[in-house]
Amino acid sequence: MKIFSNPGEMKHELSHCKDREIGFVPTMGALHKGHISLIKKSIAENDITVVSIFVNATQFNDPEDFKKYPNNLDNDINILEPLNVNYLFAPEHNLLYNDNYLYRIIETTFSKELCGAQREGHFEGVLTVVMKLLNIVNPRRAYFGEKDFQQYKLIKGMVEAFHMNVEIIPSPTIRENDGLALSSRNLLLSGEDRKKAAKFPELLMSGQSDKEVNSQLEEEGFKVNYIKTLNGRRFGAVTLGKVRLIDNVKK
Ligand code: PAF
């Protein structure tokens, strides 16, 4: 696996692969089985797979949340090596944000709902960094987990709006045995909160109304950010201790 941190050098290297199909899996690291399933899908469907690891400061509305986000590049490299990933792109902040974040991608409607209503500027940061990464890697296909369903929809919408030449491929949420959706943030839960966290998907999947789910979660000690059914899917965001968890299920 070749590792690049300079966007210009990464772009130059991949420009030699024009006759081969590139699959791309963008991540913020702390790789888990959810990422691994996206990576395996990319490897199966493309000639070359590029994984990026970049904890993107512009999508964190809370600097404390950014500081405590799990970050262990050496461990992630050990996970990627045996999977036969061709390239790891782990850009330096200043080189990726060469414009100092003067230029941004903004979606004006869906990005203001659900997580966007709670986390100001979050999707602006996500869309901007994904646009930068797609322009550097220039993949044929890019893979996103459905746990972040709103993110997936917004990225798909951006690619269509800007007539970009990449297919955005969703992949189903991978869950622990007790139903908790895999997330890098799960690592931050205390032992007791980790046990309690399984109630969140259990209630989201239940036949109860959004309002009932909301109040049951509160009774269990969760701080509820939102529980909302939209277009046949129930979305939820909760905080347990200081850890924010999101999930969604088809209704
Ligand atoms: O889902 C994530 O890990 C991030 O939001 C992404 C898509 C890599 C952009 O920073």
Image (cartoon, rainbow, N blue to C red):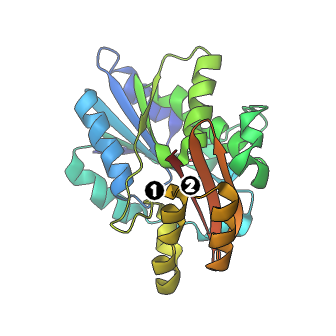
Nearer to us in this view, 161 or 230: 230
Question: Does 51 sit above or below residue 140?
Answer: below
Q: Residue at x 64, y 17 (%)?
A: 162
The residue to which callout 1 is attached is 29
Look at the image and tell me whether residue 241 can be seen. no
Question: Does 172 sit above or below residue 198?
Answer: above
Asked whether, in this view, residue 85 is left or right of residue 128, the answer is left
Q: Residue furthest bottom?
A: 192
Q: Residue at x 38, y 27 (%)?
A: 14
Secondary structure beneath dot 1 equals loop
User: Is the CB–ligand 1 distance for label 2 below 8 Å?
Assistant: yes
Asked whether, in this view, residue 216 is left or right of residue 63, the answer is left
Q: Pointer 2 and pointer 1: residues touching (CB < 8 Å)?
A: yes
Asked whether, in this view, residue 117 is left or right of residue 68, the answer is right
Nearer to us in this view, 59 or 245: 245
The residue to which callout 2 is attached is 55
How many residues crowd mark 2 within 10 Å: few (<14), some (14–19), many (20+)?
many
In the picture, residue 15 is in which quadrant?
top left
Q: Residue at x 72, y 39 (%)?
A: 111
Asked whether, in this view, residue 176 is left or right of residue 101, the answer is left
Q: Which badge, 2 or 1, comes first in the chain's sequence?
A: 1
Image x and y of residue 199, in percent: 51, 71
Disc 2 and disc 1: Cα gap in Å? 7 Å
Q: Amino acid at mark 2?
A: Val
Q: Amino acid at mark 1?
A: Gly
Image x and y of residue 43, in percent: 26, 36
Look at the image and tell me whether residue 182 can be seen. yes
Image x and y of residue 101, in percent: 74, 41
